[in-house]
Image (cartoon, helix red, strand yellow):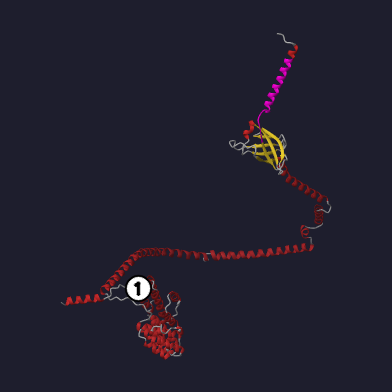
Amino acid sequence: MKKLLSLALALLICACGTVTPVPAWKENAYRHLDDYKTSFLTGREESTEPHFVKARREMAAGNDLSILTIAYLTKYSLHTASLESFDSSEFAKLYGLEPNAVDMAYCHFLKGNFSAVDARALPSRYTGVLKAALSKDLTAAAREIAAIDDPLSRLIACGVWVRYLPSDETILQMAIATASANGWRRPLWAYLTKLQTYYFEQNDVIKANTIKARLDLLKKD
Amino acid sequence: MTLSRELKVGLFIGCTAVTIILALFFLAAGKGFFEKMHVFTLSSKSGDGFTEGMPVVFSGFNIGKVQALELDDKGIVLIKIKIPDRHVKWIRSDSKFVLYRPLIGAARIDVNTSNLNSSPLDTNQITEVTVVNDINDAIAKVEPVLEQVTQIAENIEHLTRNLSDPKGDLNRALSNAEKITSNLASKKSLVEMAVSDEESVKALNDSLKKLKDITTSVDRILKKVDKMADKTDHEIYGKNGALPQINVILRDIVGKLQKLDKTVDNINKISTDTSEGMKDFHILRSDIDDAVNALGDVVKKLDAIIGSKKSPEFKVP
């Protein structure tokens, strides 16, 4: 009897499932983009770019420009999260073909053009940070960044602030904590270096040396 | 029957007259007097060279003659030629008439017929005569030669005038040569002849004496260089010289290279083995790809059975 009930339950679960098949290119593109994000953040330099190339190839097969634009914006956001500069020429090309206010607002945010960002088009999690950036309110920025749930989004917000506005120990420490908690070596290295410079600038040699020890540890690994 | 003397005389005279008439008749017939004649009209821009009675020739044979020369309203000369009936077959519509004026001999009209099967020439048709003038051609050829001869003669005249002139180039060259030879004859040496200055000759002599001193010095230097070369020989080729030591080093290097040969052989062997192993890598790679694809298929099938797979949502982080 129990067996029969289990079988009926299994069949019911299967019947509830969607029957619409997911296109292979979409599934593969999503997987490769996810792998790219992981490889980039964990500092696996050699395997990072091939994942993006594969993702791009799959997206090209689907010929969906909006998805391809998201892929490039993801790439730029990861560079921003790691305090690195990026070349937005590919996005400009795609935007020329298929303009989208949401994508442009996000790109302006990543490039630090805060006055050009359309706050309504920007993802809601960043609007608080944008307001703080426009008013250059450091306390509000720390509060808004801490309120972001997604660790990668939080790191991106930290990256935008640290790259384009005066640095603050609280924000840098928050970024270091987020990166180290998730094992993201590449941004961790960048923020530790930035914090070390900050301590040196503040003439706090002891803290700077502590950060140097942490960096050496990261280098040995 | 006896004939009277008057009758006999009469018969004789009659027979003689008949014989004479017959002879004249045959002569006239032989000369073509009774033959039918055809008259053709030719034209030429100039009547120069044409004369009445001029022969008309075909392949070197006389076939007719010029009967008359006339001038038409346009000033064109019309030449009437008379051709006997037996020769009219040579005159055809495509016949060309050429006035040929040889350098020696009488002028004539040559008939050239390329196709004897063509239609006969119409007596009303006027054909133009072309002119071949050997005399004019010869004059045209001789004229430039004569001009050249005239020029040569002028040049010769110029030369002779120059030679005969006491102030001419040749006479001046001769007088200069005379001056030079007399000047050379008064010099003491060949060098003085060349430079025509005694002080320069003295300076040259002094230089030659100094050159002797210089050669003595160079001799001394060369002897010293010889001694140095001897020493260098000893240092290079001597028992403890550089060359024997280099030989020892080279032998050592050769020995080591021989040992290295084995190592290179081993490396070759290893690389061969590696390249053979690399062939298997392709197979291994394809096997891995197959396995991965098979796993992917299994996952897809499981997803299809379970039906929990949702379409991935792309959004910026």
Instruction: Give x and y (percent) for residue B311.
Output: 32, 75
Q: Hey, which quadrant is residue B290 in on the image?
A: bottom left
Instruction: Give x and y (percent) for residue A97.
Output: 44, 74
Q: Which residue is more in the foreground, B248 or A8?
A: A8
Q: Would residue A133 be visible to someone looking at this image?
A: yes
**Dot 1 surroundings within 10 Å: few (below 14), some, or many (20 or more)?**
many
Instruction: Give x and y (percent) for residue B116.
Output: 60, 36
Q: What residue do we see at 45% from left, 65% from top?
A: B253
- Residue type at mark 1: give it: Lys
| In magenta segment, residue A171 | no
Q: Is residue A148 left or right of residue A114?
A: left
Q: Chain of mark 1?
A: A
Q: Is residue B101 left or right of residue A120?
A: right
Relative vertical location of residue A182 with respect to residue B252 in this rendering, above or below: below
Q: Which residue is more in the foreground, B190 or B43?
A: B43
Q: Hey, which quadrant is residue B198 in on the image?
A: bottom right
Q: Is residue B34 left or right of residue A213?
A: right
Q: Look at the magenta stretch and give its main secondary structure.
A: helix
Q: What residue do we see at 19% from left, 77% from top?
A: A6
Where are the magenta residues, as a range? B10-39
Tell me the quadrant of the picture where the C terminus of chain A can be found: bottom left
| In magenta segment, residue B25 | yes
Q: Which residue is more in the foreground, B85 or B153?
A: B85
Element on which disc 1 rests: helix
Identify residue for label 1.
A26
Q: Which residue is more in the foreground, B92 or A95?
A: B92
Q: Hey, which quadrant is residue B315 in on the image?
A: bottom left
